[in-house]
Image (spheres, helix red, strand yellow):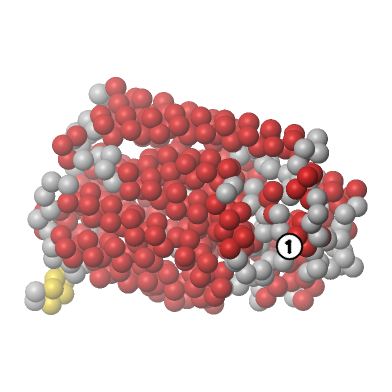
Amino acid sequence: MGDLEKEVALHHEQTPKDVASSSSTSLPELSWTDAEETAIRRKIDWHCVPIVTLLYMLCFLDRVNIGNARIQGLATDLHLEGTQFNWALSIFYIIYLLFEVPSNVLLKALGPRFYLPLLVCGFGLVSLCTAFVTNFGGLMGARAVLGVFEGGAMPGMAFFLSTFYKREELLFRIGIYVSAASIAGAFGGLLATGLSRIPEWGVAGHTIHTWKNIFFFEGLITILIGLAAPVWMPTDPRTAWFLNEREKSIAAERLVREHRTDPAQKVEWRHVKLAVMNVHNYTCGIGFFLINITVQGLSVFLPTILKDLGWQNTKAQLYSVPPYVCACLVAIAVAYGSDKSRQRGIWLAAFSVLALIGFAILRWVSQPNVRYMAVFFVTVGAFPGGPGFLSWAINNSAGPAVRAVTSGYVVTLGTIGGIVATWTYVPSDAPKYHTGHTINLGGQIGVVCLSIFGILYCAWENRARAAGKRDHRLEGLTEEEQEHLGNRHPRFHLWT
């Protein structure tokens, strides 16, 4: 490996267009201008980011619409008692986390163009069928099957984007698509208000009304969009239908040169080991876990929390919209700033402090208007955390196969936070929800600490590699074996 290539691998400062990779799949004779690369990236942006954002918005909408349905009569009609509603939420996340990593491995084998839309159609159909459940058992079954299809959606979409973008380009795009969760929260409240007012319809014994309209029509919309998605979605840079042959070569080669590996590599046991044994992945996974306690909890319980502030049904639905809109805008801005600064941890720590302040207000202040202001602090501070931790983990993983496992693995750890979230706000704690707010306050303190630890660990490891203290990992290895070191390679630079 030449000195110039080492500098590119270490710092990622120079443009990779004129640097030959040691990978056998690289095309050292291929070169291109910055203008060409920018034009190709914009084409990829247009054909990948909007469709993924739309699909994830539908994913999140079908996941959290149960919270909107609850205050429109679901709990009453299904005769839910005590913590049965919480159990219906928990079973979803339990099944969800079991399918995340297997789904990403399957995605790597089958390709995203048809597999991701298949998942979308699946959870859309389950949402539609939820309109016909009549008891607690039926609701539990529907939520469990929903977890099967949704389990692969978020990590799958993150991996899909990572196959098109370089490390410094990734978080902004993931930030946009994960911000769809905020859009779903805002849009979901408005949509639920409108759908719940549709007059009762259907046949005798199977009438659709109020909360059932929410599930039925949101599920139907999801299915239709899922069926149409493959028309627009590409599979990978080498086969992207919207690029010409030269553009395909450049789009693929720029990633080969950055990651020094073949984008088409299959997932093997060594890739799983690299992902699971990576200390930084645990930092990101636990951080994602703590963030998810807040994000998933608010997504389901916010209408109920607002209702218990004294605002009934429709007003509570509508008051849930503004915090989500602000969270969406801030999450995208944070992702953009983080990519431009090539830093992750400092952004995560700073905004988690804002969420921490919000939960402190919710825990100890009683005035409804002040508590509503605190909801803005919480959503704006917490919602950027999910894409931040996920992108941080993917950025510090080398090779598409390792990134596929990493994205599924980190999101799996994060999903456990969703299970905890379903028990943070229980009926016995209403209307102040002191226990729930205290749990989330502690979680945000943990996020700040983990973010700082991640910064210090990655900076320490980078200094060790720059000083040659990790060069022993190369001893006795062939060039191919050195490439297999992935993120453990002494010349692989970690993002802080």
* Amino acid on which disc 1 is placed: Thr
Q: Quadrant of residue 113?
A: bottom right
Left-right relation of 427 to 236: left
Image position, residue 477 (x, y; %)? 79, 56
Above or below: residue 267 compared with residue 312: below
Left-right relation of 55 to 42: left
The residue at 79%/44% (across/down) is 471
Most foreground residue, 121 or 380: 121
Image position, residue 233 (x, y; %)? 57, 71
Quadrant the N terminus occupies = bottom right
Quadrant the C terminus occupies = top right
Image position, residue 108 (x, y; %)? 57, 69
The residue at 69%/33% (across/down) is 460
Most foreground residue, 288 or 44: 288
Above or below: residue 53 compared with residue 246: above
Q: Circle 1 is placed at which residue position?
A: 261
